[in-house]
Amino acid sequence: MTDYKHYKLWKPYGYLSQFVNNQNRRKNKKLLGDLGDFDSSIMPIGRLDEKSEGLIFLTDNGKLSQLVRGGKIEKEYTVKVDGIIDKQAIELLKKGVNIQIHGKTYKTKPCKAMLMNDDPQLPTHQKPRALKHGATSWYRIILTEGKFRQVRKMSAAVGFPCLRLIRTRIGEETLDGLIPGGYERVDSFKLH
């Protein structure tokens, strides 16, 4: 039996979800490897774009990566949007909306979404939005899929552009106990 290494990490704003930078146009970018001394066999499961934050799993178990990305494990996001999102927009998100993926129209799968009445208790964003731009609001969304920039595209599709995006949960694992840039080793991931 192989002893796998597993970590959960809070990817901070401004980092790429990778360990090695193979692109010339992305020189001097911050990488996950800058956050700790990880073995070269470790890989991230599930990507977050550079401007997104939150929970990422790190592992050297490729089969686990396939399981998490396979479309059955819930991923929960807390989303700050431009404007005051309403129940109508939330209902559209729940039913699925059309977004563009690599130049083709894709209808997202039905999902769970809910308004948030209060601002979440999260560390301050590194680049806060100027107050002069108007009102903002928050909602939560739970998906089992993860297309390229899907949550951002879904928010825009219902008329509320995303200003901040934090993945707070994968399966049963959460950000609890972590700070941005922090990580902890775990024996296994609680996925169901």
Image (cartoon, rainbow, N blue to C red):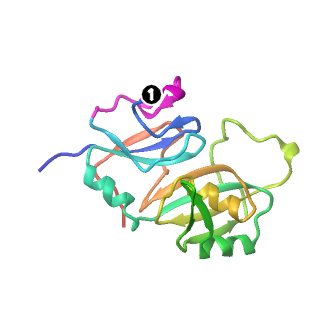
Mark 1, residue position: 34
The one nearer the camera, 56 or 144, is: 144
Q: Is residue 13 above or below residue 80?
A: above
Which of the 4 image quadrants contains residue 98? Answer: bottom right
The one nearer the camera, 53 or 29, is: 29
Q: Is residue 122 left or right of residue 129?
A: left
The x, y position of residue 67, in whole percent, is 32, 60
The x, y position of residue 16, in whole percent, is 50, 37
**Three-letter amino acid code at disc 1?**
Asp
The x, y position of residue 151, in whole percent, is 59, 58
Which of the 4 image quadrants contains residue 106? Answer: bottom right
Q: Report the residue at 29% width, 32% height from top.
A: 40
The one nearer the camera, 66 or 125, is: 66
> Quick check: can you spot residue 6?
no
The x, y position of residue 34, in whole percent, is 44, 28
Which span is picked out in magenta? 24-40
Q: In terms of secondary structure, where does tag 1 sit?
A: helix
Q: Is residue 47 magenta?
A: no
Q: Is residue 29 magenta?
A: yes
Q: Report the residue at 22% width, 46% height from top.
A: 4
The one nearer the camera, 11 or 93, is: 93
Q: Quadrant of the C terminus?
A: bottom left
Badge 1: residue crowd in 10 Å (few <14, some 14–19, many ≥20): few
Q: Is residue 145 above or below residue 18?
A: below
Q: Residue furthest left?
A: 1
> Quick check: can you spot residue 62?
yes
